[in-house]
Image (cartoon, helix red, strand yellow):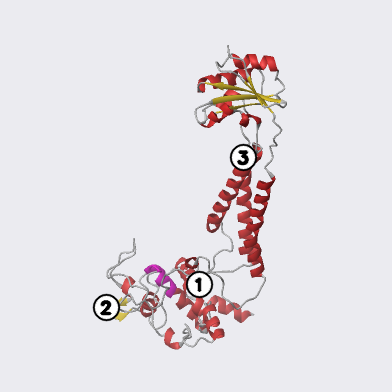
């Protein structure tokens, strides 16, 4: 039998507080209260007790569903905003790529999903636990301080429908050898002190100042450079492509591949397909079969690598060339027209070499385009040249007959 209980505080009774020697004792008391129909009681332990939620009869928490809902909200918002900005508000076509594609938008979607799910879990936990709570009457009990060290406590609140001072006391005394404590309300409020609330409001208001400054700056025009708090996030110490670099003897930032470097899976194959030559002369014929699928592949590669400068029709009027002419770039060299008689007269082997190794100001694409794709581009260039410089004899007889009938 436990000793006579002591009183804490002088106000109305808030809860009966029982102390236990170990995990098994406090878990047994929790099961007894659960079986007796008690629902409003708390177990305090210096460390998590495995299975204590079942001993207390607690229903599964709704926190995972809150986190799931917040995460799905983040997924939906991220996909919607990316679709809106890329496909609706500011569509920008790049090399025939789709305006919106799920794989390209996964990183932002993943980050926003995790962000909102973590917010939902954090704030949902606070709401479900009715936190923050500044004060509870059990905090005034001097022995309760051991709950963070080596003490195990169970408090049954008077708000429980099954609470009865005598019956509840008798039930708890059956499971503990220590005296029960009556925790009474001393009148202290559970709300945060006014000074703490004022401090939190001040911090929140100060946190909005940077956002207000950003909004104000974006609405103003200024000739002054932006303020860089962390400069290397905007101007990282690096050398840009095609820039000077005094570290190397040739003064170039871009480095050539080491001699003998080959792309994985693309070992060089001797012969015309790699060199574009038959013996010492440029080949006049294709070393691979030219099929409709082969021409379609060449058209696709041409649209990606060639049209920015040469244009869709090959007259040297691509978007890059038009932009350079608009800006009146002094060092810009107008791309050659693929329909120039000099270009049309070149053997296919020489055109292949131009694609792979470059010529004059045209860069080499051998590192980006496999040899078969380079031949496909040349085949499409030949088809493009013929389409713009066709003679009547090039029209099939059946089509000529149809035209004559019209």
Looking at the image, is mark 1 or mark 3 nearer the viewer? Answer: 3
Looking at the image, which is closer to me, 144 or 59? Answer: 144
Where 245 falls versus 85 (above or below)?
below
Magenta: main secondary structure: helix
- Label 1 SS: helix
Tell me what residue is drawn at x 29 percent, y 69 percent: 258
Assess disc 2: are there few (<14), some (14-19) or many (≥20) residues with their C-alpha within 10 Å of its C-alpha.
few
Looking at the image, which is closer to me, 385 or 128? Answer: 128
Where 333 falls versus 152 (above or below)?
below
User: Does residue 6 show up magenta in the picture?
Assistant: no
Left or right placement of residue 308 versus residue 203 in this view: left
Left or right placement of residue 102 versus residue 160 in this view: left
Q: Position of residue 139 (x, y in %)?
A: 61, 31
> Visible in this render: residue 390?
no
Residue at the farthest top position? 1
Real-space CA distance between mark 1 and mark 2, rounded to the nearest whole angstrom: 32 Å
Number of numbered labels in the structure image: 3
Q: Earlier in the sequence, mark 1 or mark 3?
A: 3
Q: Position of residue 200 (x, y in %)?
A: 65, 50
Tell me what residue is drawn at x 54 percent, y 25 percent: 152
Where 329 falls versus 247 (above or below)?
below
Looking at the image, which is closer to me, 241 or 367? Answer: 241
Q: Marks 2 and 1: in contact by CB < 8 Å?
A: no
Q: Earlier in the sequence, mark 3 or mark 2?
A: 3
Q: Which of the labelled discs sits on residue 279, or is there none?
A: 2
Left or right placement of residue 62 versus residue 161 in this view: left
Q: Which of the labelled discs sits on residue 303, or is there none?
A: 1
> Visible in this render: residue 4?
yes
- Label 2 SS: loop
Real-space CA distance between mark 1 and mark 3, rounded to the nearest whole angstrom: 54 Å
Q: Earlier in the sequence, mark 1 or mark 2?
A: 2
**Which residues are the magenta region?**
368-378
């Amino acid at each position: 039998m436990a000793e006579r209980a002591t009183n804490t505080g002088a106000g109305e009774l808030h809860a009966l507080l029982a102390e236990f020697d170990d995990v098994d004792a406090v878990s047994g008391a929790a099961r007894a209260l659960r079986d007796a129909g008690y629902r409003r009681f708390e177990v305090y332990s210096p460390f998590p007790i495995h299975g204590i939620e079942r001993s207390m009869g607690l229903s599964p928490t709704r926190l995972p569903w809150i986190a799931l809902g917040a995460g799905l909200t983040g997924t939906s918002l991220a996909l919607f905003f990316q679709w809106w900005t890329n496909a609706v508000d500011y569509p920008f076509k790049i090399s025939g790529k789709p305006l919106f594609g799920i794989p390209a938008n996964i990183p932002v979607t993943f980050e926003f999903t995790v962000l909102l799910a973590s917010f939902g879990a954090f704030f949902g936990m606070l709401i479900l636990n009715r936190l923050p709570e500044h004060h509870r009457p059990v905090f005034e009990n001097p022995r309760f301080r051991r709950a963070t060290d080596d003490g195990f406590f169970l408090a049954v609140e008077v708000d429980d429908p099954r609470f009865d001072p005598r019956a509840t006391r008798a039930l708890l005394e059956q499971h503990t050898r220590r005296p029960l404590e009556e925790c009474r309300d001393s009148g202290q409020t559970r709300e945060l002190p006014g000074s703490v609330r004022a401090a939190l409001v001040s911090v929140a208001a100060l946190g909005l100042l940077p956002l207000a400054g950003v909004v104000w700056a974006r609405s103003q025009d200024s000739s002054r450079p932006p303020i860089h708090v962390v400069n290397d996030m905007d101007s990282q110490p690096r050398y840009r492509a095609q820039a000077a670099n005094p570290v190397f003897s040739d003064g170039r930032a871009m480095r050539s591949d080491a001699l003998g470097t080959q792309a994985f899976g693309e070992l060089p194959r001797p012969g015309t397909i790699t060199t574009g030559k038959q013996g010492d002369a440029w080949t006049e014929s294709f070393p691979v079969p030219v099929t409709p699928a082969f021409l379609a592949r060449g058209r696709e590669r041409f649209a990606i690598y060639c049209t920015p400068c040469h244009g869709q029709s090959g007259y040297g009027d691509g978007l890059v060339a038009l932009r350079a002419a608009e800006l009146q770039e002094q060092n810009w060299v107008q791309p050659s027209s693929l329909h120039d008689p000099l270009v049309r007269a070149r053997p296919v082997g020489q055109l292949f070499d131009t694609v792979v190794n470059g010529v004059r100001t045209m860069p080499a694409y051998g590192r980006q385009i496999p040899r078969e794709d380079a031949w496909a581009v040349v085949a499409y260039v030949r088809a493009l040249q013929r389409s713009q410089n066709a003679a009547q004899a090039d029209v099939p007889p059946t089509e000529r007959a149809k035209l004559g009938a019209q």
